[in-house]
Every structure is written in structure tokens, then in C-alpha cells.
Image (cartoon, rainbow, N blue to C red):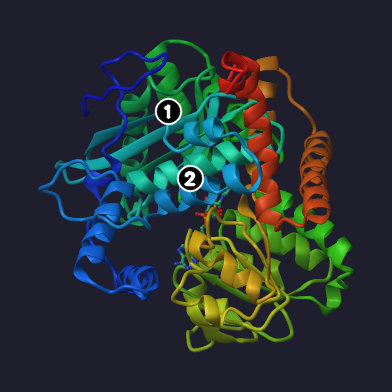
């Protein structure tokens, strides 16, 4: 485990503020290079001479805080910078105190750990694990754990920042957090996944806990993994503490309705939006990217109301049918074959009408509603001009890259933002935590009803600001959340309180 240090309430030897830009994202892909030249061109077209160029590169360097000269240059558009740049402008445009924005520009703490796992062949492999507690201004921190080969510290910090905004937006007394392990879980046996999950908790046991930081499932983690993690934590601490993690199996203290919560919350938000836009479900065409937990439930509920789900994809590819799919049927087949790839018409098991399409084609479909429900930044400068959907509901976290918000607005594409659309997951996670602490279980109807109350209230708050102040829905959601965080910071005393003359 790395020795780390951070200000605040924690043991000083355990944590550190990361050299986040120093340890990764050293490669510059084509798109970033194109962006960089576009940016330089815009800055310098009036006066193109070398000294200006040098000054610009110096500015880029300062912005990304690279601390070690020997390291390769990193670009500002990594996913964490992208997330921070989204909140940066609110101090200017929405009157949020600069002190609040400044506090949210960096995480409270990031723990990075090497996780040793005994593999089935007897060898030991080391996996990189992260946990970021972004802000605990509103309460203990909360956020999922992701298993994916693409996990980076930047990604974990970005996701933790979004969790901070999300919890504030829906009125939970939680701060934001996130965790991840760099691994392709599909390459591991079940026993190896269990050992990895327990190793993660052993490394993080002093960082997480029912009153400090409460994990949950995310991409490629599920209820069973949460159950193993709860067991490992309780073994280490020698206590019964089911509220240390949410998304557990029902038999181990999980909440009814947690499994479907993210998809149901997204469905409720889309339904509220559809009422405002007077959509007729049977005439509304939907394309879904990412047929996992969240994607399945939102598409199932929309299809039940009559929406036409014309395209569905997962990591192996997608399928398209103009007449709309029977979502439950596709789900049953995917369960049987473990991949939409096997449902393609050129494969043996195919008895589903429709044709195969790629994920790129799916994102460019002419539909009323596009639902990205897989990973972040799938709509980016490379493909934004191809997007023809009228609206986008961000079920995934951060599927639209920060830099393309303006282009979507210019193309009159409405974005229902992730911090609202997928907040159902954390809301029902909060309910699970409350039930565990009460030692009392709620019925499924109670859970669904309370979820509806919270998420529809959040939608109405956002809609009121959107209509009243002419903000985009994303900006309205961020401003609502930032104002709540600002009030909490102000309650502790901010610059305005301690130095009223300034
Ligand atoms: P999941 O692992 O159940 O499903 C992810 C799905 O995405 C899988 O079907 C996978 O095949 C697919 N996928 C992966 N890479 C893809 C690609 N390149 N193109 C198309 N599909 C691809 O995960 P989930 O829990 O449904 O989470 C999905 C998204 O929703 C993530 O961004 C997650 O952060 C977000 N989210 C989930 C929850 C939750 O409670 N599950 C809560 C809030 C946000």
C-alpha cells in the first residue's frame, strides 16, 4: 500500500492527495491532439509568433499542475479535469461563492492500493485498487466500486465528484465517493473475483465504514460481491455492520428495490420530462447503449409504457429493429447466452427480428431518446456531430464529455443529466443504509414510493430553475446541488462570515 497523507480528520500516515496528473494519462490521443491545436489556433490566430506559443504551453502546464519535470506531458482534458471544468464556471455564471468551487476542485482524500490476489494456478497477481472520498461536507461519503480494465485514479475522482453533486441534488445527507479496481473481471474465475473483492476491503478497511464512507455496486460489481465485502469488513472489525456497504443480497441485509433502483429512477425522470414535452410513448423511439443492470431496468419500464426500444447494445455489439424489441425477451436470451453477440441474426441462436449494429451506429441513430447506460465519454468531440437523437438521458455516469455540451445545445439536443437521471441508485442505497441502522425492513412498495418522492422532487427543482432562469437541465442540476453544498459550508462559516468587509 502506498504511504499517503491528507489534511483533515484522518490518520496522517494513511492517505495522500494524489499526484493525479503525474502518474497517468501521459499519452495524447488523436482527438486530444486535434483539440490542443484547435485551442492553440484560436488563441493565437491574431498574433502567431513563437513567444506566444511558449507562453501558451507554460499556461497549459500550470493548469494541469504537473509537479515532476521528468514526466511526460499530460493534457488537461482527462476525465477528472473534464468534471472539474463543469463546476468551475458556476462561480462566475451562477454566483456560487468561489470558496465553494475551490473546495470542490480537489478530492478530500484518495487511497491507492496494490491488491495481492492468489490466482487459481497458485501464482499471486497484483491489481491496482482506488477509493476516493471526495467531499464529506454534507455527511458520510457514498459511491460504488467499479471493476474495469480502464479504471484510473482520474476516473475514480471524477466519479466521486459527480456523486457529491448527485447526493446534494437529491437532498441526501451524504458526500460523494467512488472506488475502482483495474481488472477485467471476465478473465477471472469466481473464486478469484471473491479473493480480489476481499483483498479490496482488507486494503480499504480503515478508509471505509458505516459512518465514514459507504461503498455500493457499480460497473461489473454486483450484490454477491457486496455480500463478500460486507463479510470481509465484519470479519476484520469483529462487528456486525451491514450498513457499511449497500447493494447487498436481500438475505444479507439488502433492500428490496435496490437492484432496479437506478433504472427505475431514470424511468421516473424520463416520464416527468415526457409529460412536459407531451411525448406519446407509442410514437417515441428509444436507443439504449449498455444492456446491464441500469440499462435493462430503464428499458424494461419504458417498454412497459409502450415506448419503442429500437436499438440495444452491450460491450459485444448491438441489435436494431425498427418495430421495437421485446426487452424481456432479449434479457432472457442474454441471460442464457451471456452476450447480445449471440443474438445476432448471423449467429446460430438468433430468432430475434432485427439486424446487428455497432455501438457507433447506435449513437448516431435518428431517435427521440438516446440512453447511454454503459461508460463515460461515449459522446465526445469525435462523434458529437453524428448524434441525431432529439434528447439524451444520461443513465451512465458522464457519458457526454464536458467539452461537447455546447455543441449539443446548438444542435437543440436536450440532455437529461446523469446526476439526476441515475440518482435512483444512491437514493435506494441510502434507504438500505437507513433500514440497516434501524434494524427494520421496508416493503417494496414503500421503497418505490419514497424513491418516487425524492427523485420527482429533484426533477421539479431542476425544472423550475431551468424554466425560470433559462439554464440547461445540467446547469440547473449543478446549480441546485452547489447551492446546497454552499449553504452547508456557509453554516460552518465562510469568508463572507469571517470577513464581512470583503
Ligand atoms: P453493468 O455492469 O450492469 O452494465 C454495464 C453494461 O454496459 C454491460 O451490459 C456491458 O456489456 C455494457 N458495456 C460495457 N462497455 C460497453 C461499450 N463500450 N459499449 C456498449 N456497452 C458497453 O453496470 P451498471 O450498473 O448497469 O452501470 C452502467 C452505468 O450506470 C455506469 O456508468 C454506472 O456508473 C452507472 N450507474 C449505475 C448505478 C447502479 O446502481 N448500477 C448507479 C448509478 C450510475
Q: Return the residue nearer the eye: 124 or 35.
A: 35
Q: Earlier in the sequence, mark 2 or mark 1?
A: 1
Q: Nearer the viewer, residue 131 or 314?
A: 131
Residue 269 seen? yes
Judge left or right: residue 143 versus residue 328.
left
Q: Tell me if residue 139 can be seen.
A: no
Q: Is residue 364 above or below residue 93?
A: below
The secondary structure type at the circle numbered 1 is loop
Which numbered dot is residue 159? 2
Instruction: Check the image and report above or below for 233 versus 68.
Output: above
Numbered circles on residues, count: 2
User: Image quarter for residue 162?
Assistant: top right
Q: Position of residue 119 (x, y in %)?
A: 22, 43
Mark 1 neighbour class, 10 Å CA radius: few under 14, some 14 to 19, many 20 or more: many
Residue bearing the label numbered 1: 108
SS at mark 2?
helix
Question: Residue placed at 65% from the left, 40% from the top?
Answer: 95
| Residue 67, image x, y percentages | 20, 41
Against 424, residue 392 (above or below) is: below
Q: Looking at the picture, how far across and down is residue 275, in whole percent?
A: 88, 62
Amino acid at each position: 500500500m502506498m504511504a499517503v497523507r491528507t489534511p483533515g480528520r484522518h490518520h496522517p500516515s494513511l492517505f495522500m492527495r494524489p499526484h493525479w496528473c503525474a502518474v497517468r494519462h501521459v499519452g495524447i490521443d488523436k482527438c486530444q491532439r486535434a483539440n490542443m491545436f484547435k485551442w492553440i489556433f484560436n488563441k493565437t490566430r491574431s498574433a502567431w509568433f513563437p513567444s506566444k506559443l511558449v507562453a501558451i504551453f507554460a499556461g497549459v502546464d500550470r493548469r494541469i499542475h504537473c509537479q515532476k519535470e521528468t514526466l511526460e506531458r499530460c493534457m488537461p482534458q482527462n476525465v477528472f479535469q473534464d468534471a472539474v471544468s463543469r463546476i468551475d464556471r458556476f462561480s462566475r455564471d451562477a454566483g456560487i461563492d468561489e470558496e465553494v468551487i475551490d473546495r470542490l476542485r480537489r478530492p478530500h482524500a484518495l487511497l491507492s492500493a496494490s491488491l495481492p490476489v492468489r490466482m487459481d494456478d497458485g501464482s499471486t497477481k497484483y491489481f491496482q485498487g482506488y477509493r476516493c472520498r471526495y467531499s464529506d461536507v454534507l455527511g458520510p461519503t457514498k459511491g460504488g466500486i467499479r471493476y474495469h480494465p480502464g479504471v484510473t485514479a482520474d476516473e475514480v475522482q471524477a466519479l466521486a465528484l459527480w456523486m457529491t453533486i448527485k447526493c446534494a441534488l437529491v437532498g441526501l445527507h451524504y458526500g460523494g465517493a467512488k472506488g475502482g479496481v483495474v481488472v477485467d473481471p471476465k478473465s477471472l474465475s469466481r473464486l478469484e473475483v471473491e479473493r480480489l473483492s476481499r483483498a479490496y476491503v482488507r486494503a480499504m478497511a480503515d478508509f471505509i465504514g458505516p459512518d465514514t464512507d459507504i461503498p455500493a455496486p457499480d460497473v461489473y460489481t454486483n450484490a454477491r460481491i457486496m455480500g463478500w465485502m460486507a463479510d470481509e469488513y465484519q470479519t476484520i472489525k469483529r462487528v456486525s455492520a451491514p450498513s457499511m456497504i449497500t447493494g447487498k443480497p436481500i438475505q444479507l441485509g439488502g433492500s428490496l428495490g435496490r437492484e432496479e433502483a437506478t433504472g427505475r429512477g431514470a424511468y421516473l425522470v424520463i416520464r416527468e420530462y415526457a409529460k412536459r414535452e407531451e411525448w406519446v410513448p407509442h410514437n417515441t423511439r428509444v436507443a439504449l447503449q449498455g444492456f446491464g443492470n441500469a440499462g435493462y431496468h430503464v428499458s424494461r419500464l419504458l417498454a412497459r409504457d409502450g415506448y419503442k426500444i429500437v436499438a440495444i447494445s452491450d460491450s459485444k455489439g448491438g441489435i436494431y429493429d425498427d418495430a421495437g424489441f421485446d426487452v424481456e425477451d432479449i434479457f432472457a436470451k442474454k441471460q442464457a447466452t451471456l452476450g447480445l453477440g449471440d443474438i445476432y441474426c448471423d449467429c446460430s441462436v438468433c430468432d430475434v427480428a432485427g439486424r446487428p449494429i455497432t455501438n457507433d451506429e447506435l449513437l448516431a441513430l435518428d431517435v427521440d431518446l438516446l440512453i447511454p447506460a454503459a461508460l463515460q465519454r461515449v459522446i465526445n468531440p469525435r462523434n458529437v456531430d453524428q448524434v441525431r437523437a432529439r434528447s439524451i438521458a444520461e443513465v451512465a455516469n458522464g457519458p457526454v464529455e464536458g467539452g461537447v455540451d455546447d455543441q449539443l445545445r446548438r444542435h437543440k439536443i436536450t440532455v437529461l443529466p446523469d446526476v439526476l437521471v441515475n440518482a435512483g441508485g444512491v437514493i435506494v442505497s441510502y434507504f438500505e443504509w437507513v433500514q440497516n441502522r434501524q434494524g427494520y425492513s421496508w416493503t417494496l412498495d414503500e421503497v418505490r414510493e419514497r424513491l418516487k418522492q425524492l427523485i420527482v422532487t429533484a426533477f421539479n427543482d431542476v425544472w423550475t430553475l431551468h424554466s425560470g432562469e433559462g439554464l440547461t437541465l445540467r446547469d440547473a442540476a449543478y446549480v441546485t446541488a452547489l447551492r446546497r453544498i454552499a449553504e452547508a459550508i456557509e453554516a460552518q462559516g465562510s469568508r463572507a462570515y469571517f470577513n464581512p468587509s470583503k
